[in-house]
Amino acid sequence: MADSSNPAAPVGKTSSTPPPPPTQPSSNVQSPQQVEAENTVEPDTDDGASANGGSDTDEGFDSASGHSASTSLSASVRDYVFENHRRYHKYMEGRYLLPNDEPEQEREDMKHAMCVNVMDGKLHSAPLENPQKIVDLGTGTGIWAIDSGFFSSSLADTSPVGDEFPEAEVVGIDLSPIQPTWVPPNVRFVVDDAEADWVWPPGSLDFVHARHMCMAIKDWPLLLSQAREALRPGGWIELQELRFHLQCDDGTMPGPDGYGYGKFIDLCMEGFRTFGINPLMMERNAELLRSSGFENVVEKVWKVPIGVWPRDPKLKTIGLYNRSMLVDALQAVSMAPLTRGMKWSASEVELFLIDVRKSLMNTSIHSYLTFHVVYGQKPGKNDKS
């Protein structure tokens, strides 16, 4: 967890607690250069915290999933794997460690709503000019691609994007065929691995978008190299990621051994590393874009509170979304890394998560994550007609 006496300090590595203690995670990730946040978060003077630790419940988030239908694909691609009561992708089995069942789809859509709220209603930050072809890597339920398609087709005139991209084709790729069949006419989905050889010809794309891929990508330099090759000169790439380092600005966050969610993050990071995935590589996204040959690289950072403790009504809503999303993510994020990677049993994971859930509901702890948007441009003049 973060040192609560130093708001800018990243989460330190904590020792594991029950179930069978794994090996200590190594502290081999250097903190990135600090980027000033786009927002500030002040605690509410009356957050409704109770005397027993400020527990409160989330209501009103029983969102119905509209993303259970699949695109028209062969039966083999639509097959699924079931493990510990969760459903996972069959195509390239084991490549992605999170499930793809309906609870996870609902959580992904909630996370999308939260991120759009954080970005003041925007789907992207890169200064796009009339893009003709957009690719969304790791599209998941396809909600970002669909929203982009609606906006680019002028079907949502009140959107912040509006009719900015009237001719854009939006392609979402993912290992799971969980996207809906009813989509805007300029949106389509492809089952593929973002780290496999790309099918797009050199210089054919205007915008590459990737969000929440830090728990999936093993080789970021390779992915960025392929993106640069596929982009037209002057095209843009944008990476959007939550940074899983807890921070606190007012000293209310307990030390390393006193915050269940901090222990959860440390253990999950270690579990992902056993598969060659380092979710904290996203801290180097700006550096990686520059070293991959992109220019005009910009990084924006927003504080995303956990819970309803902020004073500002908008941030209070964002905090409610974030906490609900994180609570729903506990089993989804931890089950495969801890059982497959660190050899815990499923029952040991569930027992550990009891305390983690309680810690997330404690409104007296004013912790937050940060949301990072990094974008860059391929050098050269865009000569598309």
Image (cartoon, grey):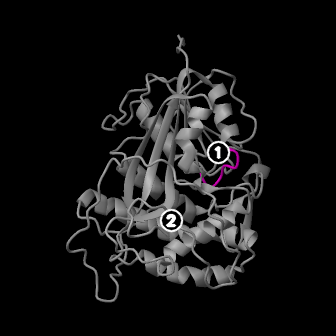
- The x and y percentages for residue 251 are 34, 72
Which residue is denoted by mark 1 in the rendering? Answer: 71
User: Depth check: 62 or 75 in front?
Assistant: 62
Instruction: Say how many tags the image has.
Output: 2
Q: Would you say residue 182 is visible in this rendering?
A: no
When asked about the image quadrant of residue 336, the answer is bottom right
For badge 1, the amino acid type reads Thr
- The residues colored magenta run 214-219
- The x and y percentages for residue 60 are 36, 68
Element at badge 1?
loop
- The x and y percentages for residue 349 are 64, 79
On screen, residue 92 versus residue 26, left or right, reads right
Q: Tell whether label 1 touches label 2 (CB within 8 Å).
A: no
Near mark 2 (Cα within 10 A), the count class, few <14, some 14-19 or many ≥20, is many
Q: Measure the C-alpha gap from mark 2 to mark 1.
A: 40 Å
Majority SS type along the magenta span: loop
Q: Is residue 56 above or below residue 298?
A: below
Is residue 106 highlighted in magenta? Answer: no
Identify the residue shown where x is 30% and y is 69%. 309
Which residue is denoted by mark 2 in the rendering? Answer: 11
Identify the residue shown where x is 55% and y is 75%. 263
Identify the residue shown where x is 41% and y is 28%. 127
Q: What is the residue that sits farthest to the bottom in this orientation?
A: 52
Q: Would you say residue 175 is visible in this rendering?
A: yes
